[in-house]
Image (cartoon, rainbow, N blue to C red):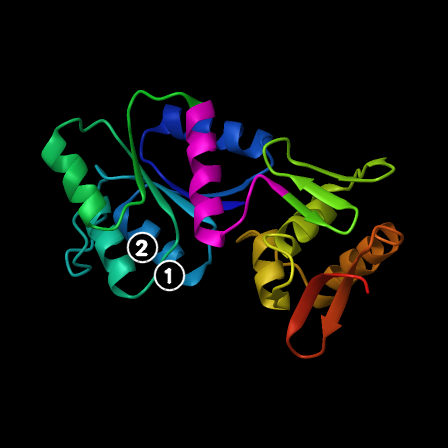
């Protein structure tokens, strides 16, 4: 998954980034309301981890006063990215305010990192309508274990090929544009070009031979993972 982490606590932020990266996720980080709002607008994410109690930068005209404001604005413009709110605030009325603003789930600090990851998986599954186990032909994706396998055993893939196949199988049978795949695999410091993406697709096609699943190119539209007939 590609995750936006909005958290100004340096120690907690660094721990969370390491934990999420170790679990195979790509994490973009923001420490204030304005930067969070900007990243949220320009980059598609699978989920947002949002601290409500954030500092604003020296931009009084931005109209952003808190993480809650950024969340309300995202929902107002039709952004349905799953949001897990992380906050030390424990009062019932503040939890209600976060949920009413459009948060999908709420977790108070301190929290267990394993629970954060489990809740993220649940939110993204719900948003994409996918299950923990996804099957297509003999190809199997176990989301909890983060593992692909076929009838002959585990399908071991390099990190970027893994992420491409994960996206195409979330769920299978839907068209994924080149831009969406490139965005998933790129960072703000590194852009993935069409040639590199096509190379990943070509290698995946060879590795999927005999599994009953194949990647079809829809020219000018994107890629589709489908069962062979």
* Few, some or many residues within 10 Å of mark 1 (<14, 14–19, 20+): few
Q: Which residue is mark 1?
A: 41
Q: Position of residue 66 (x, y in %)?
A: 19, 45
Secondary structure, mark 1, is helix
Q: Are marks 2 and 1 in contact (CB under 8 Å)?
A: yes
Q: Is residue 54 magenta?
A: no
- Residue most extreme to the bottom: 220
Q: Say which quarter of the image contains residue 94.
A: top left
Residue drawn at 47 percent across, 50 percent down: 46
Q: Is residue 77 above or below residue 157?
A: below
Q: Which residues are magenta?
A: 114-133
Q: Is residue 116 magenta?
A: yes
Q: Is residue 189 above or below residue 120?
A: below
Q: Position of residue 147 (x, y in %)?
A: 69, 36
Residue drawn at 45 percent across, 39 percent down: 122
Q: Is residue 186 visible?
A: no
Q: Which residue is mark 2?
A: 37
Secondary structure, mark 2, is helix
Relative horizontal placement of residue 116, taking residue 186 as reference (left or right): left
């Amino acid at each position: 998954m590609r995750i936006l982490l909005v958290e100004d606590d340096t120690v907690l932020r660094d721990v969370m980034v390491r934990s999420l990266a170790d679990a195979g996720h790509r994490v973009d980080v923001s420490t204030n309301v304005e930067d969070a709002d900007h990243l949220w607008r320009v980059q598609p994410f699978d989920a947002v981890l949002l601290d409500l109690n954030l500092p604003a930068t020296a931009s009084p005209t931005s109209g952003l006063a808190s993480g809650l404001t950024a969340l309300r604005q995202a929902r107002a413009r039709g952004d349905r990215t799953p949001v897990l709110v992380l906050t030390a605030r424990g009062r019932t009325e503040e939890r209600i305010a976060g949920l009413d603003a459009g948060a999908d789930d709420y977790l108070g600090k301190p929290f267990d990192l394993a629970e954060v990851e489990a809740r993220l998986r649940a939110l993204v599954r719900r948003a994409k309508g996918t299950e923990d186990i996804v099957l297509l032909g003999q190809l199997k994706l176990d989301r909890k274990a983060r593992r692909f396998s076929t009838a002959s055993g585990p399908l071991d893939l390099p990190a970027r090929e893994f992420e491409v196949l994960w996206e195409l199988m979330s769920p299978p049978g839907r068209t994924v544009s080149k831009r969406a795949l490139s965005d998933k695999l790129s960072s703000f410091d590194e852009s993935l070009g069409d040639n590199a993406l096509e190379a990943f697709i070509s290698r995946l096609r060879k590795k999927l031979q005999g599994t009953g699943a194949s990647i079809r190119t829809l020219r000018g539209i994107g890629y589709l993972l489908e069962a062979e007939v």
